[in-house]
Image (tube, grey):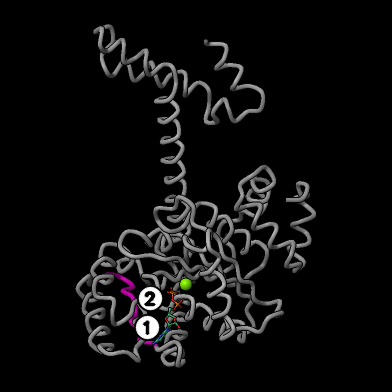
């Protein structure tokens, strides 16, 4: 890695359409270092004009294929489209990334400045969308990418985080998705805005569409129940219907939500709430781990064994110094933590 890039210069170049600079902005945000945090702050603009579309569903359902086709369609309609694949497998092998890139030959021509493809690892993301991915999506919006399509692998509870962070969520299933459909009931199916039954060229497609339609109805009476669309993406079938369904949902986003704002504003507020909650949880987990690893823990156990402290008091005594030290571990601050710890010995 070269020297720390200047955040301001990078942003200016990226905003002017420099793809290399854009890549470096996103990489820095993903890496989470000082430059990344500066860029994250600079590009954080809630309720941007962009349309963020999430594609979720089990592996192999056709998310990348559909994402590529949608990108091509939207590009042809004059949009600047960024495709972000949050892929837990692409980190190590790069194989999935290559496959996804290759598949995009279906879509926009190489060298088209209006399409950007980005792949990133979903580190520690239980919901399939790591905090860094959300910041990357926001940076893309800020940089003027009018449509951001985010692909994440998701089934069951995994995948609902995507919905929380997207304006329009598409769940992609296949006729073979029986088990996935059962799993999806607990999560993605409840939050999907459009459900795609892809690989409609395969056996059982009509039955699958009927089952999904039934499920969606059974979930029932819900305001804005998802539309179900059958596609055979490789053959290009059902794509017009999918594009139309997405367009209807996009228009719905501009309608009033009843709380004074639009549906989109309402969703984004909820997404930010969920994101803040997740960050709070992560911080608290870190604080707890630090308390567990600190010297106070053994002391507290000794106190409990001796009957000097009761558990509630012991907890206070262990947590007190950790909380007083602030959110950052002493070791995070250069030249401080180590000395402090050694001093105790
Ligand atoms: N038969 C059939 N295969 C498809 C269709 N759409 C995608 N595929 C294939 O299914 C495989 C997985 O597709 P991919 O887009 O990578 O799925 P992802 O893992 O959800 O991103 C690839 O080999 C695709 O070519 C379809 O409509 N019909
Ligand atoms: Mg894929």
**What residue is rendered at 42% in x and 31% in y?**
289
Residue 16 shown left or right of residue 132 in the figure: right
CB at disc 1 and ligand 1 closer than 8 Å: yes
Query: Which residues make up the magenta segment?
Result: 221-231
What is the CA distance from the residue labelled 2 to the residue labelled 1?
Answer: 7 Å
Secondary structure predominantly adopted by residues drawn in magenta: loop
Residue 205 shown left or right of residue 9 in the figure: left
**What residue is rendered at 78% in x and 59% in y?**
12
Give the residue number, with chain letter if any, for mark 1: 198
> Which element is circle 2 on?
strand
Relative to 29, does residue 21 appear above or below in the rendering? below
Quarter of image, ligand 1:
bottom left
Q: Are marks 2 and 1 in contact (CB under 8 Å)?
A: yes
Give the residue number, with chain letter if any, for mark 2: 172
**What residue is rendered at 48% in x and 69% in y?**
151
Relative to 331, does residue 60 appear above or below in the rendering? below
Residue 135 shown left or right of residue 19 in the figure: left
Residue 261 appearing in the image: no
């Amino acid at each position: 890695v070269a020297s720390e890039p200047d955040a301001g210069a990078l942003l200016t170049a990226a905003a002017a359409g420099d793809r290399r600079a854009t890549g470096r902005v996103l990489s820095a945000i993903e890496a989470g270092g000082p430059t990344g945090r500066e860029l994250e702050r600079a590009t954080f603009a809630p309720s941007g004009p962009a349309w963020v579309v999430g594609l979720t569903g089990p592996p192999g359902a056709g998310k990348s294929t559909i994402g590529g086709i949608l990108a091509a369609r939207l590009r042809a309609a004059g949009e600047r489209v960024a495709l972000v694949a949050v892929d837990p497998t692409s980190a190590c092998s790069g194989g999935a990334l290559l496959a996804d890139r290759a598949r995009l030959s279906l879509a926009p021509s190489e060298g088209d400045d209006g399409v950007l493809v980005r792949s990133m690892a979903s580190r520690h993301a239980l919901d399939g969308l790591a905090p860094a991915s959300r910041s990357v999506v926001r940076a893309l919006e800020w940089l003027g990418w009018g449509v951001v399509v985010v692909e994440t692998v998701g089934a069951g509870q995994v995948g609902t985080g995507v919905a929380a962070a997207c304006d329009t969520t598409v769940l992609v299933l296949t006729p073979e998705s029986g088990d996935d459909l059962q799993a999806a009931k607990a999560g993605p199916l409840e939050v999907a805005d459009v459900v795609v039954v892809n690989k409609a060229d395969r056996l059982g497609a009509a039955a699958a569409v009927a089952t999904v339609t039934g499920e969606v109805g059974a979930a029932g009476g819900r305001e804005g129940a998802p539309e179900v669309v059958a596609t055979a993406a490789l053959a290009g079938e059902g794509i017009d219907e999918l594009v139309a369904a997405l367009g209807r949902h996009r228009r719905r986003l501009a309608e009033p939500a009843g709380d004074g704002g639009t549906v989109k504003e309402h969703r984004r507020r909820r997404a930010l709430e969920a994101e803040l909650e997740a960050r709070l949880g992560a911080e608290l987990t870190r604080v707890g781990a630090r308390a567990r690893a600190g010297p106070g823990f053994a002391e507290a156990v000794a106190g409990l064994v001796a009957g000097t402290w009761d558990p509630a008091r012991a907890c206070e005594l262990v947590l007190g110094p950790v909380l007083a030290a602030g959110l950052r571990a002493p070791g995070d601050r250069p030249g401080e933590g180590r000395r402090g710890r050694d001093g105790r010995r």
